[in-house]
Image (spheres, grey):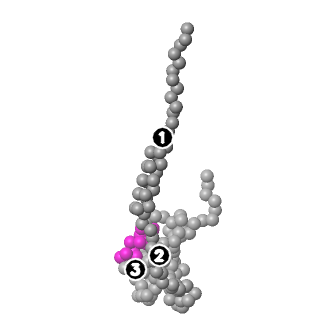
């Protein structure tokens, strides 16, 4: 007895239509590409910090310091509790052109910081950004 064998079909990928699509895509990308044109650039030499006079770079600054326990000092002189506004008024009259920088310990009470910023706002003194002194000891785990 003879059984009918199924006819094997050759599975061929039609490569010619793929090549046609490849060429169409290639033509599309070539036509739609914007080529950059060379721009004319001006040769300039920028000044560096060493070219500027020192007086214009360095400005005199005063420091309002807050330690870890909330004590205040303006230019190294301790400020008694409750007299911050009067000290800042006197400082502003003596040094109208000088800028003030607030320097705080990392353990300074937040309430004291708010009090200092409020006093500076009431007196009308613009300050430089605040710096915080971070202790060098390693933090406890």
Residue reaching furthest to the top = 1
| Residue 10 point in image, percent of width and height | 52, 31
- Residue 11 on the magenta span: no
Taking depth in this image into account, of 61 and 48 the one nearest to the observer is 48
Residue reaching furthest to the front = 2
Q: Is residue 25 above or below residue 89?
A: above
Q: Indicate which disc residue 38 carries.
A: 2
Q: Nearer the viewer, mark 1 or mark 3?
A: 1
Q: How many marks?
A: 3
Label 1 neighbour load within 10 Å: few <14, some 14-19, many 20+: few
Q: Is residue 90 left or right of residue 68?
A: left
Taking depth in this image into account, of 139 and 78 the one nearest to the observer is 139
| Residue 114 point in image, percent of width and height | 42, 68
Mark 3 highlights which residue? Answer: 125
Q: Is residue 92 above or below residue 3?
A: below
Tag 3 secondary structure = loop
């Amino acid at each position: 007895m003879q059984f009918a064998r199924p006819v094997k079909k050759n599975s061929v990928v039609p490569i010619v239509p793929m090549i046609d699509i490849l060429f169409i895509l290639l033509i599309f990308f070539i036509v739609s590409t914007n080529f950059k044109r060379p721009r004319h650039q001006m040769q300039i030499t920028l000044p560096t910090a060493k070219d500027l006079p020192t007086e214009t770079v360095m400005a005199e600054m005063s420091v309002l310091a807050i330690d870890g326990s909330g004590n205040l000092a303006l230019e190294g002189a301790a400020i008694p509790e409750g007299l911050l506004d009067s000290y800042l008024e006197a400082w502003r009259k003596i040094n109208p052109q000088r800028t003030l920088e607030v320097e705080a310990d990392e353990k300074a009470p937040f309430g004291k910081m708010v009090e200092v910023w409020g006093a500076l706002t009431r007196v009308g003194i613009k300050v430089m950004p605040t710096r915080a002194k971070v202790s060098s000891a390693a933090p406890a785990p």
